[in-house]
Amino acid sequence: METSQPQRLPPNSELSVQNAQYRMMATYMPHMYVLNIVSALLIAEVFGKVAPPTEVFPILTLLLAIAAYRLSYWLNPRLAETETFRSIQRTVIQAPYYGFAYFALLTYWIGNLLPYGTESQQLLACFYIALASFCAISFNANLPRCVYAVLLGGSVPLVISLVHVGTESALILAALYIANIAVQVIAVRKQNNDFVAAVRMHLIAEASRQDAEMARSDISRVANTDALTGLANRRALLNAISSRAAEDAQGAPFALGLIDLDGFKPVNDLYGHTAGDEVLFTVANRLKLSLGPDTIVARLGGDEFGFILVDPPKDAALLQGIAQLALDSIDKPIALDEGTTHITACCGIARYPDVATAPNELLQRADEALYAAKRSGRGSALIYDQELESRQTRRLLLETRMRASIADRSFDLAFQPIQDLSDNTIVSYEALARWNDPLLGPVSPGEFIPLAEQIGLIGPLSDVLFDRALQEAATWPRGVSLSFNLSPLQIHDPRFALRALATLSKHKMPPDKLIFEVTETALLKDLDRAATVIEQLRHAGIRIALDDFGVGYAGFSYLERLTFDKLKIDRSFVSGMTDDKRKRQIVKAIVEMCHSLDIKCIAEGIENDTELVHLRAIGCDAGQGYLLGRPGPPPLLQADGADVRATA
Ligand code: C2E
Ligand code: CA
Ligand code: CA
């Protein structure tokens, strides 16, 4: 890596030297002209008494006019405001002409006056010119052209006229003058070289300082920018949060938003990483546009983004509206070479200082809000508030208790019958998890199953339940199967089929007595992997039921890709179907579709006779619901499949 900057002069170095010369002139010229005016008046006073006024006053007036004009130029209070590079250059170039004109005129004037004066008056006049030219030379030491102009205009004619006078003292004066001028010219040349060198050194130093600064700002830009999207990166966002949090002592609140894309991985898998990058780039631009130039938008890595909203609206609904707009801006088709894709995102927001007093805490809150938003479904935005905080506390409590309950296997199962609708026999029992925690009381599976999935406890929990369920089902007669629910994680786990088969053989339970239920949404995460697991399970003889049919987002593609043995029509279509013609039509259509695909169709959530009658009428194969049997303790089955307790 190159460490030393090459010494270089900026292209305007000549101008900079002129600028420095100009500054020197601005300092000394007023003094010089004042001195000249005073001296000229004194000479006029001396020679006014002896010489004719026509020889004294016209040229005196001219001299005074030039001096006054230059004085007024240098003393102009607006000089600094009107300065431009051009005016400075002009002044520096013109200065020698003024110098020459003034001194030529002065010498000419004195030359004309000399014959009228006594010898001492003559020497006084010559002395005056000598003094004035010394003065001008030393004031203009940094402007050699001025020095030469003064010499040419003043000194040369002075020496000539001294020689012309010819007296001994005039000649001595001329000799002394020449000697002094010579020494002074040498000194001036040296001084000027030093001066120019100093200016240039300064310029070089300044140029390297600027180079170093640019390099520094380049490094810091790279270190704070996300290379793919050009947005700020995680580091820059964290810095911005920290510095704003420090500023907040002065009271400017802000909101931190975290955004995570929904289903970005399938886009990458389906279209490739270049397309994935294009999607991220497009999302970045849409976010920037939607949130406006005053909002810091960052990409935190992967498909995660973040933003800092300065002075956010107090009203939570408004703040959520802003986030929702940003999410809506993402939720539009994205054209790729490989086709058009569509992506949604979730957003979690936390306000500073309302819900957090330190940057880390704020990040955690926003993250919790994002997590909650993710749980409430694609495209949702959530603000961290009291309610979310209490939900969070409950989650933590549930989590600790769940770990303990898994460890001492204190989960239970309820069994709900599934009936063949043609002959009312029970074809299977669905095992439903139950948790009655000594501290928390009964917790519904609708609450703890999703939580177990989120915190990665569904595997161990399900192992406990599956073992328990098989223990029961192994004793059932051959015609009665066990339906067991699988979580998304299990249906994507390549080792799951083997583990399930091992548990089956441990309980000596034939695989064809087992039905695994999987939901549409569980399949969505990675259809290929799910398909592999399902294939393995079916190959081993285990049947698969598609659960909660109709409420997923998946469309029909997986029905084409995967083979199911059973399909369970979601409760939401069955309940209320008596009074709702459309629901009836939908249920009928699903039943017909199942028959044409050779899939057994089960209606969930049958609660009354009319529903049952109707389902029978349209040829639905099986049913489940409170009407046919509530989830309850393990059935005690006789050899013919009848429940001992039910018949008792
Ligand atoms: P699911 O698989 O759809 O289970 C059926 C749910 O509907 C059960 O709720 C059941 O009690 C309820 N249900 C049955 N008949 C009726 C009815 O006629 N009316 C009404 N209103 N509800 C009825 P539950 O036991 O609360 O389970 C809820 C969900 O939790 C299950 O929905 C399932 O997705 C999940 N779940 C339960 N146990 C397990 C398990 O062991 N493993 C996994 N992965 N998920 C489970
Ligand atoms: Ca189920
Ligand atoms: Ca279901």
Image (cartoon, rainbow, N blue to C red):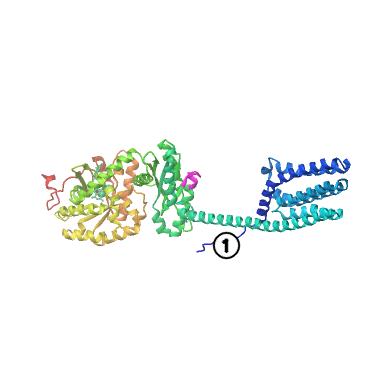
Q: Residue furthest top?
A: 315
Among all residues in the image, which is located at the extreme front? 168
Residue 431 can be seen in this image = no
Residue 492: where, in percent of width, then height?
30, 57
Answer with the quarter of the image where residue 489 lies.
Answer: bottom left
Relative vertical location of residue 356 with respect to residue 193 in this rendering, above or below: above
**Which residues are drawn in magenta?**
288-296
Res. 477 in view: yes
Residue at image point 53% right, 62% down: 4
Q: Quadrant of the image for the C terminus?
A: top left
Residue 293 lies in the magenta-colored region: yes
* Front-most of residues 261 and 575: 261
**In the image, residue 69 lies in the stretch drawn in magenta:** no
x 69%, y 47%: residue: 28
Q: Residue 550 in the image: x percent, y percent?
A: 33, 48
Q: Secondary structure at mark 1?
A: loop
Mark 1 is on which residue type? Answer: Pro
Q: Is residue 605 left or right of residue 192?
A: left
Report which quarter residue 627 is drawn in.
Answer: top left
Residue found 24% across the figure and 47% down from its top:
400
Q: Looking at the image, which is closer to me, 10 or 121?
A: 121
- Residue furthest left in the image: 648
Q: Horizontal placement of 231 versus 614: left or right?
A: right
Q: Nearer the viewer, residue 27 or 330?
A: 27
Going by the image, does 112 lie left or right of 412?
right
Instruction: Residue 63 in the image: state x and y as whole percent.
Output: 80, 44
Local crowd at mark 1 within 10 Å, few (<14), some, or many (≥20)? few
Label count reads: 1
Where is mark 1, residue-wise?
6
